[in-house]
Amino acid sequence: MTAMVWDFTIQTLSGIVGVFVGVWLALVFERRKRVQDAAEEEARVMGEFDRVFDSIVSSVIKNTAEAKRLLRLLGTPRCPAMLHADLETAVWYASHGQFTQLCRNVDERVIFAQFFDDVRRLQAFLDFRTNLQVSLLEQRRDKDEFDVQVLTTDVDKHLASLAEDLRFCGVLLVTDHGKPVHKRLMGIQTEAAPT
C-alpha cells in the first residue's frame, strides 16, 4: 500500500513539476518572441522615419536653394518685375503627419514645422509682390514715380528679408539635423573623422 502511495505521490509531483516547468518555458519563449517582435517593429518604424525624414530634409535643401536664388535676383540692379519661385511645401504637407507621429524629439518637430511655415509665408509674400507688379502695370504707373519706387523698394527689402531668414533657417536645420549627404548637398563642410 505504501508503494502505491509513493508511486502516486511521485507521479503527481512529477506531473505538477512538469506543468510548472512547461508553463515557465512557455512564458520565457513568449517573452523572447515579444522582445524580438518589438525590436522588429522598432526597426520598421525607424526605417519609415528615416525615409520620411530624408524626404523632408531634401525639401528643406530645395527650399533653401530657392531662397538663395531669390536673394541673388533681388540683389541685382536688373531684378525682374515678375519673380517666380519653385518653393516646395507638398512634401511637408504629405508627410508631416507621419513625421510628427514618428519623431520623438518635440523640438525637431517644432523647428521643421516653423521652417515650412516660413516657406508658406515667403511664397505668400512673393505672390503679393507679383500681384503688386501686375497692379502697377495695369494702372500704367511709371516705375520712376517716387511713391512707386518707395513701395517697390520696401516690398523687395521685405521679400529679401524673408528669403534670408528662410535660407539661414534651412542651413541651420541641415547643419544641426541633416545627415552627411544632406550637408554635402548644401555645400556645408563636415568635420573630418580623426584618423
Image (cartoon, rainbow, N blue to C red):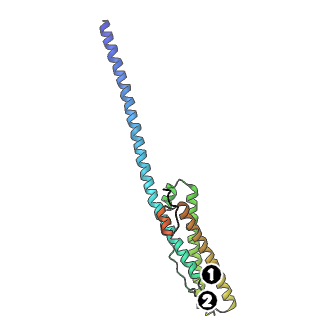
Mark 1 surroundings within 10 Å by alpha-carbon count, few (fewer than 14), some (14 through 19), many (20 or more)? some
Residue 148 vs 95, above or below: the answer is: below
| Residue at 51% in and 55% down | 103
Q: How far apart are the alpha carbons under marks 2 and 1?
A: 15 Å
Residue 69: quadrant of the picture: bottom right
Category of crowding for the residue at label 2, using alpha-carbon neighbours closer than 10 angstroms: few (below 14), some (14–19), many (at least 20): some
31 horizontally vs 121: left or right: left
Single out the residue that lies furthest toward the top: 1
Q: Which mark is residue 136?
A: 2
Q: Which mark sits nearer the N-terminus, 2 or 1?
A: 2
Residue 129, percent from left and from top: 59, 81
Residue 157 in the figure: left or right of residue 26? right
Residue 149, placed above or below residue 122: below
Residue 153 screen position, x and y as percent = 65, 84
Residue 195 horizontal/vertical position (percent): 48, 56
Is residue 32 shown left or right of residue 161? left
Q: Which mark is residue 57?
A: none
Task: Give the residue drawn at x 39%, y 37%.
Answer: 30
Q: In terms of secondary structure, where does tag 1 sit?
A: helix
| Extreme-front residue of the structure | 195
The structure residue drawn at horizontal position 46% and vertical position 57%, both measured from the top left corner, is 49
Q: Looking at numbered disc 1 in the image, what kind of residue is underneath it?
A: Asp
User: Which of label 2 and label 1 is nearer to you?
Assistant: 1
* Quadrant that contains the N terminus: top left
- Indicate the amino acid at tag 2: Leu
Q: Is residue 145 above or below residue 91?
A: below
The residue carrying mark 1 is: 156
> Is disc 2 in contact with disc 1, using a CB cutoff of under 8 Å?
no
Element assignment for label 2: helix
